[in-house]
Amino acid sequence: MMTDSAQPGAGKDLLTVDNVTLQYKTPQHLVTATYKVGFSVQESERYVILGPSGCGKSTLLKAIGGFMSPVTGEITIGSRPVTAPGPDRMMVFQEFEQLMPWKTVLQNVEFPMRATGKFGRNEARERAVAMIDRVKLGKFRDVYPHMLSGGMKMRVALARALALEPAVLLMDEPFAALDALTRREMQEELLGLWEQLRFTVLFVTHSIEEAILVGSRILVLSPHPGRVRAELDASRFHFGEIDGAEFGALSKRIHGLLFGAASRVA
Amino acid sequence: MTTSSVATRAPRPRADFEQEAADASDIGEVERSLSLGERLVNNDTARRLAVLIVLGAVWEIYARWVDNPLILPTLGATLTTFFHDIASGVLIDRVATSLRSLMLGYLAGLFLAGVLTTIAVSTRIGSDVLSTLTAMFNPVPAIALLPLALIWFGLGIPSLVFVIVHSVLWAVALNTLTGFRSVPDTLRMSGRNCGLRGVRYVALILIPAAFPSILAGLKIGWAFAWRTLIAAELVFGVSSRSGGLGWYIFEARSELETDRVFAGLLAVILIGLIVEAVIFRFIERQTVQRWGMQR
């Protein structure tokens, strides 16, 4: 089903995170979120950052998005350093509030294309319509977000980000607020879209299973502060293989990396 | 003994089974339209109209029982004077004068509120300035500033506009600032993600996202302005040449035409109702309700 050796543009580093330490301030503390994290994402890769809650993986994604700057180290996309938020790194958030409630599904998908000036009026309209059809929301094009279910809102957010053709799609635990069935559906759909469009995606999750299913490469971060624990290949796993022995073995291995061999669950 | 009683609490084993879902075709009425009566009871306007009719009837009956037009004219007499003064153009003229000063003050207030809030969201000191000013002036009744307005601007429109601006400004600025502050972080980030900054960010993200609060501010501001205006006209309308609605009421009182006083009050109420129930309701339905930001 997935032939990773034949990826177009494969092998080129698109996004590089080099030796990045991130700190942020709360009213009482200075928190170090990640410490000297380094990795690189290649074109058309499904790169997953996996770690327990509070390991700084969301903070890392925000830094890549340009919403905060690292204390040490550098983040580069293409060959330019990341300094500010920009439409070449479209983010999909976990919260449903990311959609604009005052715009219909179609207007929401069109908005970034028009606001950035990357596409003209007619082209933006055509692309939005096509992308909405792709995420199977054709019937809901003129509906306001408050009338959609959680899964549908997530599809709109995904369509909005993909329609802009960002260099890399950043997804911050996008399916964590969905129910288990919808989550599985959305994971399959994301993979289906990737099959068609071969976009580069950086995906943050705390679910080992989701990481193996969605990712082609997994970066495992240690608990607070986040440090690189491992980088693993997961491109060989497909949806039918969740119950397989190899899937289970990798899952156990990651579990061991995250929580130590002592607490490994049989 | 205990072991046996625990054992008896275990569930009785049952066989697994699978079946087709039961046929739902005999469920009866799935959907039917409501009768006229049911729809009337569910209609807000119809119910409120009924309340109005009852109130009007109570007024009419009580006024006839009191039988003293100097103290309490009947609803009928009030309505007759009301329509008579509309037909003769007096009331329309008074209302127009009032609305003119009102719009002037309201728009000036909104403009100042916009400027102050923009400064307040973009700088920390601006936010402190607005918070302090609002805390100081919001509790001051506009009418209390009227003597000062008279010293500064004399009798006439400028004084009216001054007190109206005061009554609009703080309510609108406070609500808008609260609205801006409660825009969710995710929405802010997805706006900045599209590369939006400065005025475009405020206009395309912050204002629509904060619109429920802004609209609430506009409504409160309107109500404050309307009250202030009528009260201010009552106080010094006497000496101004072209009086407003407040002056109309004051004039009627000095000539002991109580039915005209009531007709003036009726006009005050009606205009308040129209703005609130027609204009603001319309804006609400077209915006925040349609967007699901408010029930």
Image (tube, rainbow, N blue to C red):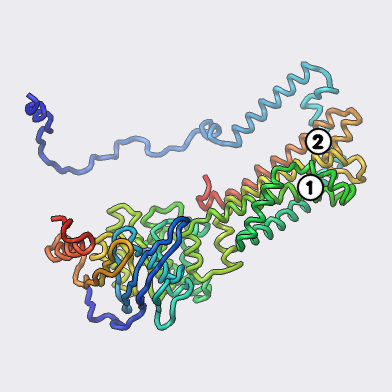
Q: Does residue A118 sit above or below A208 in this rendering? A: below
Apparent side of residue B238 relative to residue A58 in the rendered image (left or right):
right
Q: Which residue is mark 1?
A: B163
Q: Whole-percent x and y of residue B139?
A: 70, 42
Tell me which chain the residue with mark 2 is part of.
B
What residue is rendered at 34% in x and 59% in y?
A54
Tell me which chain the residue with mark 1 is part of.
B
Apparent side of residue A245 relative to residue B35 in the rendered image (left or right):
left
Q: Does residue A234 sit above or below A260 in this rendering? A: below
Label 1: state its secondary structure. helix
Apparent side of residue B77 relative to residue B126 in the rendered image (left or right):
right
Q: Of A4 and B44, which appears nearest the observer? A: A4
Q: Whole-percent x and y of residue A214?
A: 27, 66
Q: Quadrant of residue B146?
A: top right
Q: Which residue is mark 2?
A: B264
Q: Of B97 and B85, which appears nearest the observer? A: B97
C-alpha distance separating marks 1 and 2: 22 Å
Residue A244's tag is: none
Q: Whole-percent x and y of residue B206?
A: 56, 60
Q: Whole-percent x and y of residue A123?
A: 48, 74
What residue is rendered at 80% in x and 29% in y?
B78
Answer few, some or many: residues within 10 Å of disc 2's Cα (few below 14, many 20 plus, some between 14 and 19): many
- Say if residue A156 shows up in the picture: no
Task: Report the amino acid beneath label 2.
Answer: Gly
Q: Quadrant of residue A162?
A: bottom left
Task: Give the total number of marks visible in the rendering.
Answer: 2
- Say if residue B253 shows up in the picture: yes
Task: Report the amino acid beneath label 1.
Answer: Val
Q: Does residue B100 sit above or below A127 in this rendering? A: above
